Image: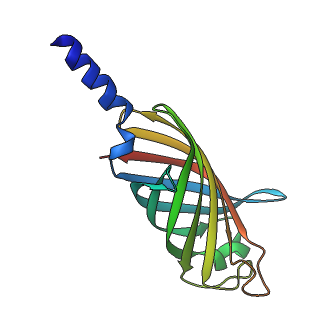
Amino acid sequence: MKKLLLIFIIIYSNNIRASNNQLMIYTGQSSRSSGLEELYTVKLQYSQPNEFFRIPGRRNIEAGFFAFGEHESNLDENNQFIAGLSQDLYLLNSPFLYAGAGLGGYIKSKSTERISSKVTFGQKVFIGVNVNRVNIEAYFRHYSNGTLTNKNAGQNFVGLAVGYYY
């Protein structure tokens, strides 16, 4: 009986991420070719596990904002709300370590000098670790309007996320 219980615990713990919803909080800083700048992002993401052509992933609902730092007043036009839907795929998916890429569509509260439309797309690459029901993830994200308008310098963020599976 103890062996059976031990086998059940091992199987359950190895599949804990595959069968649960997730809540994550993302924080990041804007990255340009000249380096980091004082433009920050905070986002909340709700995810459900899914498969896309048999590749494990998660579908996401995201909402957050961009805010400039106190020293860079030329970035204050970028203060805005952003929300959207995205799909992430796990390219590496082990019980402890995972990595992947994602794509989504977003609506911003205003257009800016860098992306002159309120509709934007986001691409993301990420790598993370799982410890029980908690995960920590590093990411790089690029926002762009796909050249829907003439102004499309894009916006890049690098950062960390912390999540909880329930």
- Residue 109 or residue 9, whichever sits in front: 9
- Residue 119 or residue 40, whichever sits in front: 119
Residue 133 visible somewhere in the drawing: yes
- Residue 65 or residue 9, whichever sits in front: 9
The picture places residue 122, in percent across and down from the top left corner, at: 62, 67
- Residue 96 or residue 36, whichever sits in front: 96
Residue shown at the point (20%, 19%) measured from the top left = 5
Residue shown at the point (49%, 41%) measured from the top left = 136
The picture places residue 88, in percent across and down from the top left corner, at: 53, 56
The picture places residue 108, in percent across and down from the top left corner, at: 56, 79
Residue shown at the point (74%, 87%) measured from the top left = 149
| Vertical order, 114 against 52 (above or below) | below
| Vertical order, 100 against 3 (above or below) | below
| Farthest-out residue, top | 2
Residue shown at the point (38%, 43%) measured from the top left = 18
| Vertical order, 87 against 163 (above or below) | below
The picture places residue 19, in percent across and down from the top left corner, at: 33, 45
Left-right relation of 83 to 32: left
Q: Which quadrant, please, contains the N terminus?
A: top left
Left-right relation of 113 to 66: right
Left-right relation of 47 to 84: left
